[in-house]
Image (spheres, grey):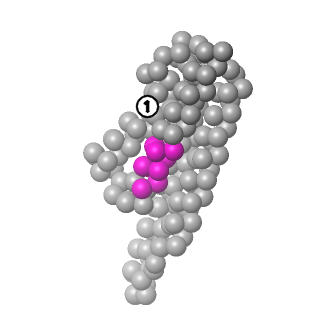
Amino acid sequence: MKKIVIRFWIINLLISIILFVAYRIAISQTETINGNSFEKWIQFFELLLNFGFSFFYFIAMIIFSFAILLNLIKKVRNKLYLSFLTFLGLPSICIIYMIFTELINFQMLNFFSVIYIFIMTIQFLMFRKIIEKTRSE
């Protein structure tokens, strides 16, 4: 059982790294405006702000992935709701908070957040399927 949880945790870390790199690539592909020097400085600071948010987002995803290790506890692993919260609880709460408070107004970051939630949902369903299969054996 330990190997299954650790494997899902490592997969979650890899997904976080891949999404971080993809977000960085998306940031670097944004178009720049050929304007005066003030507009160039504003774009530079906007780029730095986007990189800062992407780093913050990456750190948050790494912290969220540690919650998956709570499935090593038998009581958490055997209850569907608690196991669901270890995969999707913290990320969902943070995404909802960011959307409702409009803490960030970056559509690109929201897009990558939705992708992360979608992938974590699929990963949770796969995890539950494996847990049910091992429990029945």
Q: Is residue 63 visible?
A: no
Residue 97 position (above or below residue 105): above
Q: Quadrant of the C terminus?
A: top right
**Nearer to the camera, 18 or 98:** 18
Indicate the position of residue 53 as horizontal and vertical percent values: 47, 54
Look at the image and say whether residue 118 sits in the magenta stretch: yes
Residue 39 position (above or below residue 133): below
Kind of residue indicated by mark 1: Gly
Magenta segment boundaries in residue numbering: 111-120
Of all residues, the one furthest to the front in this rendering is 137
In the picture, residue 97 is in which quadrant? top left
Of all residues, the one furthest to the top in this rendering is 75
Look at the image and say whether residue 69 sits in the magenta stretch: no
Indicate the position of residue 66 as horizontal and vertical percent values: 59, 31
Indicate the position of residue 38 as horizontal and vertical percent values: 39, 81
Residue drawn at (54%, 70%), measured in percent from left and top? 28
Residue drawn at (45%, 38%), measured in percent from left and top? 91
Of all residues, the one furthest to the right in this rendering is 3
Q: Main secondary structure of the magenta part?
A: helix
| Disc 1 residue crowd, few under 14, some 14–19, many 20+, Cα 10 Å | some
**Residue where numbered disc 1 is placed:** 89
Residue 15 position (above or below residue 51): above
Q: Is residue 16 visible?
A: yes
In-image side of 131 versus 102 (left or right): right
Residue drawn at (33%, 57%), measured in percent from left and top? 105
**Nearer to the camera, 26 or 124:** 124
Q: Quadrant of the N terminus?
A: top right
**Nearer to the camera, 48 or 3:** 3
Indicate the position of residue 4 as horizontal and vertical percent values: 67, 27
Residue drawn at (61%, 27%), measured in percent from left and top? 130
